[in-house]
Image (cartoon, helix red, strand yellow):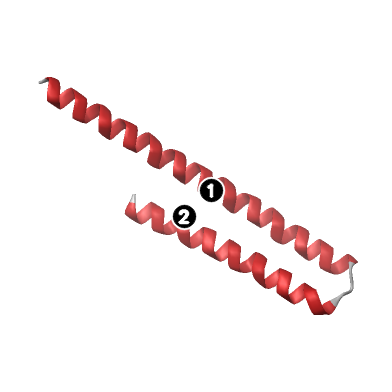
Amino acid sequence: MNNLFSSIQIVQVYSLIKIGFLIIDFAFIIFLSVVIKQVHAMNTIVNDSSDSSIIRSMAFFLFIAAVSLFLTALVIL
């Protein structure tokens, strides 16, 4: 009986860790959406076309990577 309670407590701890990871990852997605908006605002103010495509593509790549990480974690965890 004692072994059952300890295994239930371990499962609860792992569940809290999983939920915490998903919350942090979702907050990172929100942060990256703000970064994408700021990159767009920066590109409208600064008219330098050589670096703007690199910065914009890196912001979108990070956003897509964060969303795919969240969806993968949702499926796996």
Disc 1: which residue: 26
- Residue 43 vertical position relative to residue 38 in the rendered view, above or below: below
- Residue 28 vertical position relative to residue 67 in the rendered view, above or below: above
Q: Position of residue 29 (x, y in %)?
A: 58, 53
Q: Amino acid at mark 2?
A: Phe
Residue found at x 46% / y 45%: 22
* The image quarter in which residue 5 lies: top left
Residue found at x 81% / y 79%: 50
Residue found at x 79% / y 74%: 51
Drawn side of residue 65 relative to residue 7, left or right: right
Callout 2 crowding tier (Cα within 10 Å): few <14, some 14–19, many ≥20: many
Q: Of helix, strand and loop, which one carries label 1?
A: helix
Asked if disc 1 and disc 2 are in contact, CB closer than 8 Å, the reply is yes
* Marking on residue 71: none
Q: How many marks?
A: 2
* Marking on residue 70: 2
Q: What whole-number distance in Å separates the C-alpha atoms at marks 1 and 2?
A: 7 Å
Q: Position of residue 55 (x, y in %)?
A: 72, 69
Foreground: 65 or 33? 65
Callout 1 crowding tier (Cα within 10 Å): few <14, some 14–19, many ≥20: some
Which label's residue is closer to the chain start, 1 or 2?
A: 1
* The image quarter in which residue 21 lies: top left
Q: Position of residue 9 (x, y in %)?
A: 26, 27
